Image: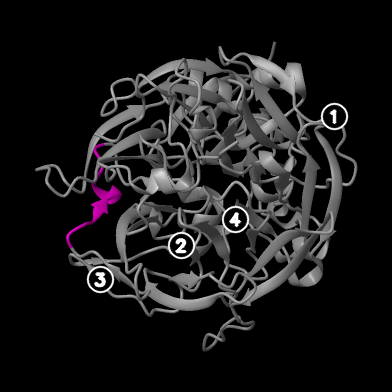
Amino acid sequence: MSTYRVEMVNRDGQVLVVSAEQSILAAAEAAGIALPFGCRYGVCITCAARLIAGKVEHSRTVALKPEQLAADFVLLCVAHLRSDSRLQVGLESQWELYRNPWRPTI
Amino acid sequence: MTQTHTPCCGPGYASPEAAMRADSEKLLYTTALYVGSDVQAPDYLATVDVDPQSPAYSRVIHRLPMPYLGDELHHFGWNACSSCHGDPGRSRRFLILPGIRSSRIYIVDTEEARAPRLHKVLEPEEIKAKTNLTAPHTVHCLADGQVMISMLGDGEGQGPGGFLLLDERFEIAGRWENQADGMRFNYDFWYQPRHNVMVSSEWGAPRTFYPGFDLADVAAGRYGRRIHFWDWQQRALVQSVDLGEEGLIPLELRFLHNPESTRGFVAAALSSNLWHWSRQNGDWQIQKVVDVPAVEVEGWPIPVPSLITDQLISMDDRYLYFSNWLHGDLRQYDIGDPLHPKLTGQVWCGGLLGKSGQVQGHTLRGGPQMLQLSLDGKRLYVTNSLFSTWDNQFYPDLNAAGSYLLQIDCDTERGGLAINADFYVDFGKEPEGPARAHEMRYPGGDCTSDIWI
C-alpha cells in the first residue's frame, strides 16, 4: 500500500503520512490534528484546502465549482494523495470561496 | 419557574391564551457554532440567563458541547409541547438537536433546566441506511409521542429530501410521507391538526446550499419557490403552489397560533416578501402581502435584497415579526387585518446598509436573523448568524467577532420596537473562541414550538 507525505504549510509545516486509501481528513484525525469538516461526503466546503504542490485524487468532490477546482481547491474529506504534496488548510485557505455576489469584486 | 408540568396535565398550556399568562422566561437555550470558523471545537448548546432579577442576567451560564466536531447545530425542537397538554404522562423534557451539516441528531435531556445533558446520539450512517435522508432541519413533536424532522436531502445531498419520524424512545421509525409527488425541495414545516393540514416550504438541495449562495444556482432553478399543503392524516401532498419569480426561497412558515385558523404566513427570503395563506372553499389560497424593496448601495452593481430569513407570530396572533438579514432591520407588523399587515415597529441590528448603532459599546455585526418571542409578546430575542458558509460570504467578520444575542422590547399596545440596552450576550467572548448563535428556545415553550390539537 502506497503512502505519501503531505506538508501543511500553514500549520508550522507539520507533516502527515497518509496511505493512498485514506482520505487526507481521516489521516489528520487519526494523527490528532483537528481540521475543519462538515458533511464528510464531498458536498459541502467546510473542509476545503488549497493544494500548493503535488497530486491528489478527488473525483468524489461535488461542492467545488469548475473555477474553484481550477484554483486548486480540494475537499479533504474525499481527497486522496497520489504524490507527496503541500497544502494550505483551514478557514484561512478558504476565503476565496466565500464571495458576496452583490458586493463588487475588488 | 415557568410551569411545564402539573399533576393534572401534560406539557404546555391549554390554549394560546393560557400560554400568554405563563411566567416570564428565565432561561433561554441557543445553539452555538464553531463549524465554518477557525476554531476547531464542537458546537454546543448554550444556556443563557434571561431573568432580569438574576446576578447572571444576560450571560451564558452553561455550555453543553457535542461529542463531535463539524455538526452545524441549527434549528431544534421539543419531544412534547402543548399538543400533549391533555396527557399527564408526558413532559417537555428532551430537546431534539440536529446537525444540519453532519446529519447527526442529538437528544438532550433538560431535566436539570440550567445544565442540560446529552441523552442519545443518532448517527448519520444509521439515518442514511434506514431512510436515505440527510440534512435535518425543523423539529416538531406530534401529539402521539413521535417526533418529526424535515430532512433536506438524500444520501447524495440531492433534493427533495423528506420527513424523518422518531418514535417515543428516539429510535428511527422511518419516513413520514406516503406521497410527495411535486415536492422539489424541503425546508420548514408546521401543521394545524384541526384542519388536517401540514404545510412545507423549499430551500434547496444540500449540495446546492451547503457550499454557499450562488446567483447562478438561482438562475438554474436550484432553489425553491413552492409551498406544499399536505393531508396530515394521509401523509400525502395534496396541493403545491408555485410562488413564481416573486416567491424565491420561501423559508419559515407559521400558522396562526389559534388552532381554529387556516391562516398562516411564509416569508420568501430571496424575493424578500411576505405571503399569507388560508383555505377558501376547500382550496389553499396564497397571496403576497408585504414587499421589502431591494436597496441600491453606492458602488455595488446590483440592488441588495433584504433577505427575510426568519419570521414569527405573537401568541395572540396580533403581531408578526421578521428579520431582514442583509439590510439589517427587524420589523414588527400588526396583522389584525392579515391581508394588509401594517408596519408598526422597526429597529436596526447590524446589516450591510450601515444604519445600525451600538449596544453596550458593541458594534452590531452580521444582521438580525433567528427570532424568538416571549409568550406574553413583550420580549423579542434575536441572533445574527444564518448558516456558516453563508455567514462567511456576507459577514466574514463574524468569524473573529462571534455573534450577538439581543433582546428587543416590543410595545404591544401601540406598536414599536426598541433594543434593551441592559441586555447583550457576547458570543465573541466564549471560552473556546468566538461562536455563532442560532435558534433559541425556552424551557417552558415559546412562540415557534407549540401546536394545539
Residue placed most toward the observer, B263 or A27: B263
Residue B411 in the image: above or below residue B225: below
Looking at the rendered structure, the kind of residue marked 2 is Tyr
Amino acid residing under circle 3 = Gln
Circle 4 sits in a helix, a strand or a loop, which is it? helix
Q: Looking at the picture, do discs 4 and 3 lie on one chain?
A: no
Residues under labels 4 and 2: Cα distance? 14 Å
Hey, what amino acid is under mark 4?
Answer: Leu
For the residue carrying disc 3, how many other residues have a C-alpha within 10 Å: few (<14), some (14-19), or many (20+)?
some
Point out the tag, 2 or 3, that comes first from the N-terminus.
3
What chain does mark 2 sit on?
B
Parent chain of label 4: A
User: Which numbered mark, 1 or 4, is in the foreground of this view?
Assistant: 1
Q: Secondary structure at mark 2?
A: loop
Residue highlighted by disc 4: A97
- Assign a secondary structure to mark 3: strand
Q: CA distance from mark 1 to mark 2?
A: 40 Å
Q: Magenta stretch?
A: B422-431
Q: Residue at x 37, y 80 (%)?
A: B355
Asked if the residue at tag 3 contacts the one at tag 4, i.e. Cβ–Cβ closer than 8 Å, the answer is no
The residues tagged by marks 1 and 4 sit, at their Cα atoms, a distance apart of 39 Å
